[in-house]
């Protein structure tokens, strides 16, 4: 591995660690923490924690798209190291669809009044 690749690899993992530590110690959505409004991803951390306790019903209640986050983040971080990866067009389509799904879930929650997962208990 050359120095540039090692540096890029280290920075990618450092960002993941920083985000993880931020969420663990503050345990609140960063957007909600700083802007005082919920975001389309609110509930993701609690959904993953519920899934780790094998409480999938509660996890889906916190955020129905929680299951898509880990594979997406792992792929995004490791895709440059993969020998065989998705085409750029396919990646853009998948990430765009995920973004649209997150926004749709958010809008549905706001319009339906289902803000239980968006509030910190």
Image (cartoon, helix red, strand yellow):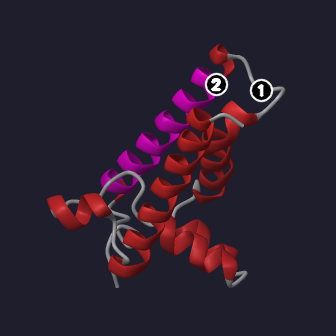
Q: Which mark is residue 56?
A: none
- Residue 68 is left or right of residue 54, and the answer is left
| Res 35 → quadrant | bottom left
Q: Residue at x 59, y 59 (%)?
A: 66
Q: Residue at x 44, y 41 (%)?
A: 104
Magenta stretch encompasses residue 47: no
Q: Nearer the viewer, residue 63 or 71?
A: 71
- Residue 107 is left or right of residue 78, and the answer is left
Magenta stretch encompasses residue 105: yes
Badge 2: how crowded within 10 Å, few (<14), some, or many (20+)?
A: some
Question: In front of the other: label 1 or label 2?
Answer: 1
Identify the secondary structure beneath mark 2. helix
Q: Which mark is residue 91?
A: 2
Q: Position of residue 47 (x, y in %)?
A: 55, 70
Q: Is residue 10 above or below residue 85?
A: below
Q: Position of residue 111 (x, y in %)?
A: 32, 51
Majority SS type along the magenta span: helix
Start-end of magenta stretch: 91-111
Q: Residue at x 60, y 48 (%)?
A: 73
Quarter occupied by the N terminus: top right
Distance of label 1 from label 2 (alpha carbons): 9 Å
Q: Are marks 1 and 2 in contact (CB under 8 Å)?
A: yes
Q: Is residue 63 above or below residue 78?
A: below
Q: Is residue 53 above or below residue 68?
A: below
Which residue is labeled 1 in the image?
A: 85
Identify the secondary structure beneath mark 1. loop
| Res 67 → quadrant | bottom right
Q: Is residue 37 above or below residue 101?
A: below
């Amino acid at each position: 591995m050359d120095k540039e690749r090692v540096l890029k690899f280290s920075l990618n993992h450092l960002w993941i660690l920083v985000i993880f530590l931020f969420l663990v110690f503050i345990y609140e959505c960063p957007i909600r923490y700083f802007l005082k409004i919920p975001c389309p991803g609110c509930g993701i951390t609690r959904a993953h924690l519920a899934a780790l306790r094998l409480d999938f019903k509660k996890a889906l209640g916190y955020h129905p798209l929680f299951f898509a986050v880990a594979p997406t983040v792992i792929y995004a971080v490791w895709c440059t190291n993969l020998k065989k990866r998705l085409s750029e067009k396919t990646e853009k389509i998948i990430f765009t669809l995920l973004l649209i799904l997150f926004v749709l879930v958010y809008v549905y929650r706001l319009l339906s009044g289902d803000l239980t997962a968006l509030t910190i208990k």
